[in-house]
Image (cartoon, rainbow, N blue to C red):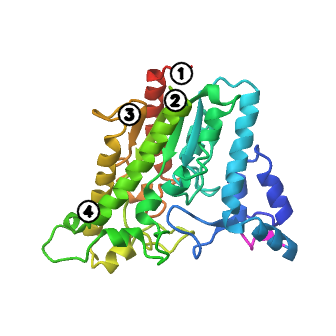
Amino acid sequence: MTVATKSFDELEAMLADPDVPDSAIRPYLVADPDTSRPFDPVIVPDPAQVSMRPLDEVRARGLGFLDWANRWSRWRRRRRFERRFSAGDPAPVLVSEGDSWFQFPLLLDDTIDRLEPHYLIWSLDAAGDTLADMTGRDREYVRPLVDATIGPRVRGLLFSAGGNDILGSDPGTGDGMPVLEKLVRPREPGKPPAAHLDEAALEKRLAAIEAGYRQVLETVAEVRPGVFVVGHVYAYEIPAFTGDPRDPTWTRHGRWLREPLARRGFEDPAEQRAIVRALIDRLHGRLARLMGGNCPGGAYRHGWLVNCRDLLDRVEEWADEIHPTGSAGRGLARVAERFDAVIREALAASPVG
């Protein structure tokens, strides 16, 4: 289908109208694979479909062009929330804070997009956010909880974090080396793949993730007692392989899982998948001991865990190595369905409302 070329102002006018669906805006966008990072796809206007004057470029870049799609996605969600809230929509109010599984800006129908028709969701999500971003000094998720108008109606916080902290580049070193590469020792023939995990490095990462989740759980309990927290564990991701049918536009396929593992000597796709599974299992074990709402022995009764580990076992359900598919393949639709089941269970158990 041919789409008419638009000016940058016309594109932003479409974005500024919450009634214009993301699907109508997608033909005018393109991903930038050179600047995209794990859990942080960079989405920009397609120069073949959007005409930009020099002043448009200056204005967009001055506002933070690399975060342009994130900001518009958040703004559009906020306007939809405010309109429904003001109209007295009785749907449960939730706050969401997360990475690109919660906000894959505009190009994929992500988890929150799928949940939004059933709930009123105050979205603070941003592709690329790390756990440190979400739990640092700003702690954006606290604001709606203490807001005099929204706070009393909030039933739960949806939380998606930890992926960037294991697969992203380490912000503390500035060396650009993927964290995944630092968590795996060089391959030794005859040794099981999972036995190559660097236990000291992995323990440090998992301890930091656990501490971040504990902070969120304790902060929510303090500022808005009775509100539940729903976190999740990612599905077993599938590293790129020879003949892989996936062809994401936002990254060089294989750069996030296959290539870091290959640099450690793991060329066999089965061995690569075994390492990824081991890492996700370890993350699950760490979070399960916190989320007592539906995990036996969990430390926090208001914590609930969505276990996505075994959810997506077909490559057709993955848009790339770490993101499930949007509309085609139903990857993120299945993730949202599993979230919805846990949210409904938490709502039934929650004394709020």
Q: Tag 1: residue type?
A: Val
Residue assigned mark 4? 274
Q: CA distance from mark 1 to mark 3?
A: 16 Å
Q: Tag 3: residue type?
A: Tyr
Residue assigned mark 3? 300
Question: For the residue labelled by badge 4, is the local secondary structure a helix, a strand or a loop?
Answer: helix
Magenta residues, start to end = 46-52
- For image coordinates 37% across by 75% down, the residue present is 260
- Please report whichever mark, 2 or 4, sits nearer to the chain's N-terminal start: 2
Image-based side of 66 in relation to 188, left or right = right
- For image coordinates 43% across by 39% down, the residue present is 338
Q: Residues within 10 Å of mark 3 (few under 14, many from 20)?
A: some
The number of numbered discs placed on residues in the rendered structure image is: 4
Residue 319 magenta: no
Measured as percent of width and height from the top left, residue 255 is found at 45, 74
- Please report whichever mark, 1 or 4, sits nearer to the chain's N-terminal start: 4
Residue assigned mark 2? 227
Q: Residues within 10 Å of mark 2 (few under 14, many from 20)?
A: many
Question: For the residue labelled by badge 3, is the local secondary structure a helix, a strand or a loop?
Answer: loop
Q: Tag 4: residue type?
A: Ala
Q: Disc 2 or disc 4, which is closer to the eye?
A: 2
CB contact under 8 Å: marks 1 and 3: no
Q: Disc 4 or disc 3, which is closer to the eye?
A: 3
Image-based side of 262 in relation to 152, left or right = left
- For image coordinates 74% across by 73% down, the residue present is 48
